[in-house]
Image: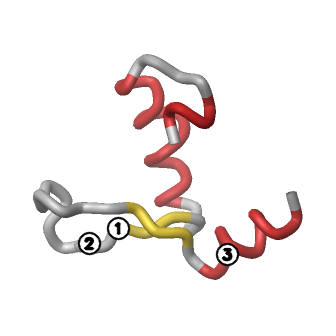
Amino acid sequence: MMEKLQLKGRDNFLRLYLFPSVEDGFVTLLYPDKPRHPRQKYLLTVKGLALLSEI
C-alpha cells in the first residue's frame, strides 16, 4: 500500500492511513487477536470493497 501511495515513512503511513482505515471498517486484520502475528495481513472488508468499486 505504501508503494501505491508513494509513501516512504512507515510511521506516518500507519498513523494517517492504515489505523484510520481499520477503525472506520474499510480494512480488517487477518489475525485480529494477534496483531504481531508473523503472517499478519490486512484485508478489505465489504465496506472497503464497495469504496474500491466506486473509484
Q: Which quarter of the figure has residue 49? A: bottom right
**Which one is in front, 27 or 4?**
4
Q: Which residue is mark 3?
A: 47
| x then y, percent, for residue 23 | 49, 59
* Residue furthest top in the image: 8
Identify the residue under disc 1: 29
Residue 35 placement (x, y as % from top left): 19, 59
Looking at the picture, does residue 52 appear above or below residue 32?
above
Q: Measuring from the top left, give residue 43's x and y in whole percent.
A: 46, 68
**Badge 3 amino acid:** Lys
Q: Name the mark on residue 32.
A: 2
Apparent side of residue 54 relative to residue 48 in the rendered image (left or right): right
Q: Quadrant of residue 31?
A: bottom left
Q: Determine the CA span between mark 2 and mark 1.
A: 5 Å
Q: Secondary structure at mark 1?
A: strand
Of callouts 3 and 2, which one flags the residue occurring earlier in the amino acid sequence?
Answer: 2
Instruction: Tell whether label 1 touches label 2 (CB within 8 Å).
Output: yes
- The amino acid at mark 2 is Pro
Q: Secondary structure at mark 3?
A: helix
Pick whichever of labels 3 and 1 is earlier in the sequence: 1
Mark 2 residue element: loop
Q: Which mark is residue 20?
A: none
Q: Residue at x 36, y 25 (%)?
A: 11
Residue that appears at 76% across and 74% down: 50
Q: Residues within 10 Å of mark 1 (few under 14, many from 20)?
A: some
Report the Cα–Cα distance between label 3 and label 1.
14 Å
Which residue is at the far front? 3
Q: Residues within 10 Å of mark 2 (few under 14, many from 20)?
A: few
Q: Amino acid at mark 1?
A: Leu
Looking at the image, do the residues carrying marks 3 and 1 touch, with CB atoms under 8 Å apart? no
